[in-house]
Image: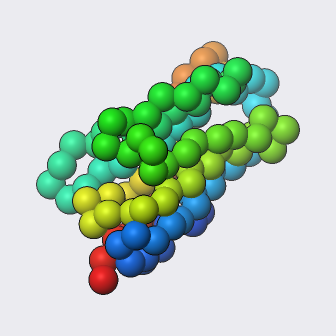
Amino acid sequence: QVQLVESGGDLVQPGGSLRLSCAASGTIFSIYDMGWYRQAPGKQRELVASITNSGRTNYQNSVKGRFTISRDNAKNTVYLQMNSLKPEDTAVYYCYAQMVTTTPLRVYWGQGTQVTVSS
């Protein structure tokens, strides 16, 4: 069974840092784009950052210069380093990965990890 398992969410003070991790496991033949979405209460899910399998990155404007996405292809893992956190970054963060497994290419999602930025 293919799954994405996230970790790293926590309560942090404004200005603090967190590092989210998301590891893919199971029978995986190829991984293409990986990334992170977030959803705050009462708001739509929005793309935070993405990274291709060649390392090209894309960021939402509100996190540019504060968040860094990276991946370790040998470990099938994507990371999100979040610095200078603000209360408006509070949300459930979901990782995703475009993967070919025993089924054709499709998007897989993690279960979500809560990030709360508050003093």
Left or right: 116 as drawn, with respect to 99: left
Residue at x 43%, y 34% (from the top left corner): 59
Residue 93, visible in the rendered structure: yes
Residue 5 appears anywhere in the view: no
Which image quadrant is residue 62 in?
A: top left
- Taking depth in this image into account, of 87 and 28 the one nearest to the observer is 87
Tell me where residue 116 appears, x and y as whole percent: 36, 70
Could you say where residue 22 lies in the image, as x and y percent from the top left?
62, 50
> Between residues 64 and 69, which one lies in front from this camera angle?
64
Left/right placement of residue 33 relative to residue 26 reads: left
In the displayed orientation, state which residue is furthest to the left: 42
Image check: 76 left or right of 91?
A: right
Q: Residue at x 60, y 18 (%)?
A: 105
Q: Which colour style is shown?
A: rainbow
Extreme-right residue of the structure: 74
**Residue at the front extreme of this rendering:** 65
Quadrant where the N terminus sits is top right
Say which quarter of the image contains residue 114.
bottom left
In terms of depth relative to the viewer, which is nearer, 103 or 59? Answer: 59
Q: Is 6 drawn above or below residue 76 in the view shown?
A: below
Nearer to us in this view, 115 or 105: 115
Residue 79 lies, with reference to residue 113, above or below; the image says above
Left or right of residue 3, residue 11 in this image: left
Q: Identify the residue shown where x is 76% and y is 31%.
A: 28
State the residue lying farthest toward the top.
Answer: 104
Q: Quadrant of residue 34?
A: top right
